[in-house]
Image: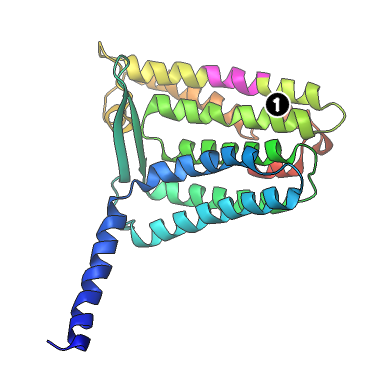
Amino acid sequence: MSIAAAEAAIGPAIVSAIYHVLEMIPWDGYFLILPISAGSLIFFLPHRGNKVIRWYTIFICMLELLLTTYVFCYHFQLDDPLIQLVEDYKWINFFDFDWRLGIDGLSIGPILLTGFITTLATLAAWPVTRDSRLFHFLMLAMYSGQIGSFSSRDLLLFFIMWELELIPVYLLLSMWGGKKRLYSATKFILYTAGGSVFLLLGVLGIGLYGSNEPILNFETSANQSYPVALEIIFYIGFFLAFAVKSPIIPYIHGYQTPMEKPIIVLVCF
């Protein structure tokens, strides 16, 4: 066999091997962990020279966006209606709590949009100089919480990721807001935490209904039958939680003037 023929035969084999290796990578977990893990390294960067921190954060945001775009283009089957890129690991045996992630067609748009908006918001945060390391870490932590919310396939994990966003947002508002930033941030966290009570009750109600052990798997819970009255109660609970978190109720999201919130936090959240 000539050298050219050997190279022609080995080339496709190497490409195929690389492709199979990439297929085995738990992409979902990387999407979730990468921003907050990379953000924790910010504190080891020199505190002088904010440009290094800014460019590092922008690089992480763009890397996350490019990775998600690549995976959705080459490792996600658009004609498959089932959950893909699934990860399922036992986490807490006592409560049957699993690290269960997966992505379907509805998750692709929000995840890509989150990456795009977070990258733009990080660019818009270029003038921020006070406590730059903490600021950019909180931005990346909020990014991870949002990715986790869109890819969680476990009810309790979804609730944790949903609440994980509140901590960075509260700190961002209270430290980089306007003159009444502490008042605004405290009122914000109280209202959103109050709405989360309805979400928690709905999660526990679905997980504990009709079983001695909690069932927190999205797919199993979706295929289970519930009384109509109970479904209405669950619906109201989830609706109230989402309505408080989203700008649906004007009183909750309208009491703060735009000057009380950093515009970049408004864009991301």
- Classify residue 99 as left or right of residue 254: left
Picture layout, residue 205 above or below residue 8? above
Quadrant in the rendering for residue 97: top left
Please indicate whether residue 217 sits to the left or right of residue 197 in the image.
left
- Asked if residue 169 lies left or right of residue 236, the reply is right
Out of 235 and 171, give the one closest to the viewer.
171
- Amino acid under label 1? Ile
Mark 1, Cα crowd under 10 Å, few <14 / some 14-19 / many 20+, is some
Residue denoted by label 1: 252
Question: In the image, what residue occupies the spot 45% across and 45% down?
Answer: 31
x 59%, y 29%: residue: 243
- Give the image location of residue 165, x and y in percent: 58, 32
The kind of secondary structure element at disc 1 is helix
The quarter of the picture where the C terminus appears is top right
Considering only vertical position in the picture, is 210 above or below 156?
A: above
Q: Quarter-wise, where is residue 245 in the image?
A: top right
Inspect this view and state whether residue 48 appears.
yes
Answer left or right for 142 relative to 105: right
Q: Residue at x 68, y 28 (%)?
A: 170
Q: How is the image coloured?
A: rainbow
Q: Residue 100: image x %, image y %?
A: 34, 33
Q: Residue furthest top?
A: 212
Which region shows up in magenta? 190-197
